[in-house]
């Protein structure tokens, strides 16, 4: 048996012509596989937008902060549970919505931006990311923002917006000419910015409504798929943030207030699912759905404790929006796959870096912490 026979796994009796054809076929397969990996990594298209370029842009805009998330860098871990009330079971076969099902939850409140030690500010976008631990090792991870719509429609627009919105050190605000140029190319973002600017800003995390913004699909037991968006609506009445709050010298006042509230009692939100109608945008998160769409209260999130980020808790969780249980599926929104890929790149990058203590050190606890 020749060396080529051994390397290709060819039988000893294969003729030289057949052996050459086998080698060519294997070579073509390897070349195709390598090409697929190269294309996925953006190596064959230097101008293509890749997860690495998105994460690099965050670092370009916010500066290097090793060990921290590249966005929503400042945060506090929380823990609690979700109790389904059965109303969601008609739309989704996911066990989390079953009547009487109580699902352990861990999560993270955060502020948008890549600077982990920045002072809390009223206008900074608030977020809540959750990880539901279902039976049979299923999980549901979701990242929500206290916004009415998302500011961009595509990953490319998001990449452009990051640079356009970079703060000028002299003014502390974005360059108006850069933003004007961005909106000229992306009129849908200009409309979304108007909705975002007009949103009411509440006193803190506990009375904020957090929305999925992206559309998903709920899949019922009979296979029927329904477009949905969801929101966590607070049990506490919304109270506008006051001038006295924003004038506080405490750099972590939003997180400190949340910790103090959790020390007093659990905090609750209702999970409200909005059902999309015919013609409602599922691939454009800059567009709100009509206010008259059917909404279902499918259960209650109860948070009972909080702890600073550290090894082993929410600091080390990648809240990938495409980690979904059976019964919830992604829509055709291009931002979902882009978010998933960028989150993975950010997670991998920070996992290999030395960590520094979180800026948020307040703790609270009515129960177990994550």
Image (tube, rainbow, N blue to C red):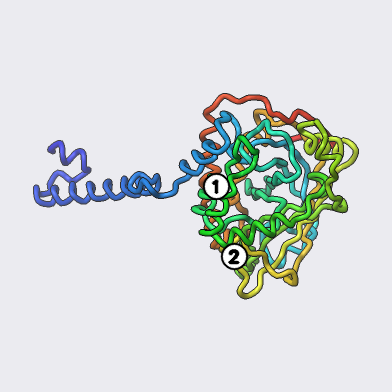
Q: Pinpoint residue 350: horizontal percent, then vertical percent.
A: 55, 32
User: Gap in Å between the C-alphas at discs 2 and 1?
Assistant: 26 Å
Q: Quadrant of the N terminus?
A: top left
Read off the residue under disc 1: 164
Residue nearest the observer in this picture, 241 or 288: 241
Residue nearest the observer in this picture, 183 or 339: 183
Q: Residue at x 71, y 54 (%)?
A: 197
Q: Residue at x 81, y 34 (%)?
A: 256
Read off the residue under disc 2: 282
Label 2 element class: loop
User: Which quadrant of the view contains residue 250?
Assistant: top right
Question: Which of pointers 2 and 1 lies earlier in the amino acid sequence?
Answer: 1
Residue nearest the observer in this picture, 241 or 136: 241
Q: Pinpoint residue 270: horizontal percent, then vertical percent.
A: 80, 55
- Residue 304 showing in the rendered view: yes
Q: Pinpoint residue 289: horizontal percent, then vertical percent.
A: 68, 67
User: Which quadrant of the view contains residue 99?
Assistant: bottom right
Q: Is residue 206 left or right of residue 309?
A: right
Label 1 element class: helix
């Amino acid at each position: 048996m020749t060396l080529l026979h051994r390397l290709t796994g060819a039988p000893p009796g294969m003729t030289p012509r057949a052996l050459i054809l086998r080698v060519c076929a294997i070579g073509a397969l390897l070349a195709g596989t390598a090409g697929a990996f190269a294309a996925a990594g953006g190596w064959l298209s230097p101008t293509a937008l890749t997860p690495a370029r998105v994460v690099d842009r965050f670092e370009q805009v916010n500066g290097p902060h090793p060990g921290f998330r590249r966005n929503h860098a400042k945060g506090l871990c929380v823990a609690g549970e979700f109790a389904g009330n059965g109303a969601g079971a008609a739309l989704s076969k996911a066990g989390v919505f079953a009547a009487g099902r109580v699902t352990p939850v861990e999560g993270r409140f955060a502020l948008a931006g890549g600077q982990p030690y920045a002072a809390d500010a009223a206008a900074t976008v608030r977020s809540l990311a959750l990880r539901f631990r279902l039976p049979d090792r299923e999980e549901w991870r979701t990242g929500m923002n206290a916004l009415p719509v998302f500011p961009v429609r595509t990953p490319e627009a998001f990449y452009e917006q990051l640079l356009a919105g970079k703060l000028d050190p002299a003014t502390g605000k974005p360059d108006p000419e850069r933003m004007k140029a961005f909106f000229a190319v992306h009129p849908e973002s200009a409309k979304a910015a108007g909705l975002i600017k007009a949103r009411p800003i509440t006193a803190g995390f506990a009375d904020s409504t957090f929305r999925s913004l992206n559309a998903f699909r709920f899949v019922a037991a009979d296979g029927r798929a329904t477009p949905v968006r969801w929101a966590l609506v607070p049990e506490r009445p919304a109270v506008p943030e006051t001038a006295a709050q924003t004038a506080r010298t405490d750099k972590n006042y939003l997180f400190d207030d949340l910790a103090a509230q959790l020390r007093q009692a659990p905090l609750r939100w209702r999970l409200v699912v909005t059902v999309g109608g015919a013609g409602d945008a599922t691939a454009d998160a800059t567009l709100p759905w009509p206010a008259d769409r059917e909404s279902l209260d499918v259960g209650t999130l109860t948070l009972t404790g909080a702890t600073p980020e550290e090894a082993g808790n929410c600091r080390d969780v990648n809240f990938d929006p495409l980690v979904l249980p059976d019964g919830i599926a992604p829509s055709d929104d291009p931002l979902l796959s882009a978010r998933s890929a960028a989150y993975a790149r950010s997670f991998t990058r920070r996992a290999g870096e030395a960590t520094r203590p979180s800026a948020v050190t307040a703790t609270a606890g009515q129960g177990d912490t994550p």
